[in-house]
Image (spheres, rainbow, N blue to C red):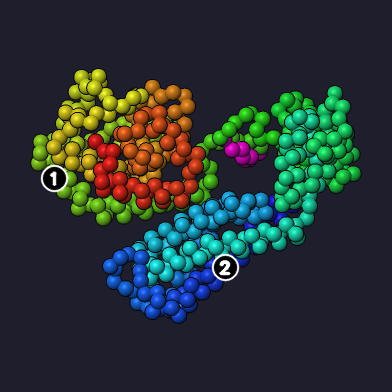
Amino acid sequence: MQKVHAASLGWLARVTDAVVVGITFLIVAFLRQRARELWSFDVLPGAPLMAPVTVQSQFHLVFAVVPLWLFSLTQHQLYDDIRRIRSDVLLLRIASAVLFAFGLLLVVLFLFPPAVPTSRSFLLAFAVVSIGTLFLARRYEARSARKRAPTWNILVIGGAAEAAPFVDTVLRHPQWGLRVSGVLVPDGEDVTSVHGVRVLGRIQQLTDIVARENIAQVFMTGRAWDTATLRFVADRCEEVGVTFSMDANFLGLSIARADVNDLGGWSVLSFSSVPSDGTALLVKRAVDVVVALGGLVVLSPIMLLAAALIKIEDRGPVFFSQERSGLYGRSFPMYKFRSMCVDAEEKRKALEAKNEMDGPVFKMARDPRITRIGAFLRKSSIDELPQIWNVLRGEMSIVGPRPPLPAEVARYERWQMRRLSMRPGLTCLWQVNGRNKVDFDSWMRLDLEYIDNWSLFLDLKLILKTFPVVLTGRGAS
């Protein structure tokens, strides 16, 4: 019932947010219309002024803005349980969601230009104002939900030392709608209360206490429970339809998140330290395909010119294919424009002593194997463009850790192997933080930071940061 209540609050919040976003858009359009003499500028200096903004001329954009804003708010987990998000976290998530939605809106307007032009400063002003209106609306919704929400009686099972921190956490968050009715302790503990909450008895008395105290959920804390005790508690809760929860930190994992799945009738408790939001990952893949197709079309003249210059210089092959390790170490051929002499791989052994990168990676600023055209291709990152084909094939992504050589992976330390748990990409945190100027361990930690904090918004931010890095050639060699 708690999940049903949280879900109903989430859908109510979606409806409210849709109304708030739509009204905010129309109000900002009205203000722009009324203040057209004072508000006649656009975002880009020197850009030609757009047609005057009116409510009538911009009304059609509401049907694009509202779905994009709701989609982004959903992706930023703002509807999971609106009562349990702290105000500071709430504001940060809303700001991130609106910024991501604003980026999506610009992409949509670029791909499908509206018949009636709009103003970038108007859209930017609307996005900024919507952060405030959504925040205020959500604060009001959360406060109202806490007043109306039923209080669920919970029972905590565990030793006093282990149960106390959990009880304290629940007591400090009354907005969760949970009331600790009591604690059950194991045999051998002679205590009357845990953090101010009364001890109701022993674990063997679970059945009677659940019925007497109208318990809705049982929480089992601690790590030292034997299988028979766990089975006893789980069975007693299942018999009366009470939700049974246990401490998911019993393995001491600091990064992995717990999830329960059904596998052909088997209830499987899974712990994952990589992104597991199926919808967001599906969107990421869809963006990869769209961007890759568009990139092949838009960049084809540059790629044809690069191919011609490589062929003219030494008559050698245009492309260079190299085996790389992808998702979970699966091998695939990664394509690049050839930027070195034809026998570069054979000459590498003689240059190993001049490697300027620590760890298993080989990097050399003035590598004698690089051709004249190759030096320009590397500096401008044009040599990486054929990897768009790898993205289209699903072997790579637009954003993700760079794919290593199998020989490099063989020399990885164990903690570095986790960077293979996400599809490799064209750009990542390493690319926008100095590339070859970053030591190997820092490079690996940047990739793990990306995996641990991954979101669609982070991908968009990294893509935008990559453009100036590519244009200036910073850190490339």
Residue 254 is one of the magenta-drawn residues: no
Horizontal and vertical percent position of residue 185: 83, 31
- Under tag 1, what secondary structure? helix
- Residue at left offset 40%, top offset 28%: 441
Q: Tell whether 256 sits left or right of 192.
A: left
- Going from N to C along the chain, the mark reached first, 2 or 1, is 2
| Residue 474 visible from this viewpoint | yes
Amino acid type of disc 1?
Answer: Ala
* Residue 246 sits in quarter: top right
Q: Which residues are magenta?
A: 256-266
Residue closer to the observer: 217 or 194? 194
Mark 1 and mark 2 in contact (Cβ < 8 Å)? no
Judging by the rendered image, the residue that carries numbered circle 1 is: 308
Q: Residues within 10 Å of mark 2 (few under 14, many from 20)?
A: some
- Residue at left offset 24%, top offset 22%: 354
Q: Tell whether 165 sits left or right of 125.
A: right
* Residue 19 sits in quarter: bottom right
| Residue 333 visible from this viewpoint | no
- Residue at left offset 64%, top offset 55%: 82
Amino acid type of disc 2?
Answer: Val
C-alpha span from label 2 to label 1: 55 Å
Residue closer to the observer: 137 or 252? 137
- Residue at left offset 28%, top offset 38%: 475
State whether the magenta stretch is mostly helix, strand or loop: strand
Q: Tell whether 47 sits left or right of 105.
A: left
Q: Tell whether 256 sits left or right of 427.
A: right
Looking at the rendered image, the quarter that the C terminus falls into is: top left
Judging by the rendered image, the residue that carries numbered circle 2 is: 20
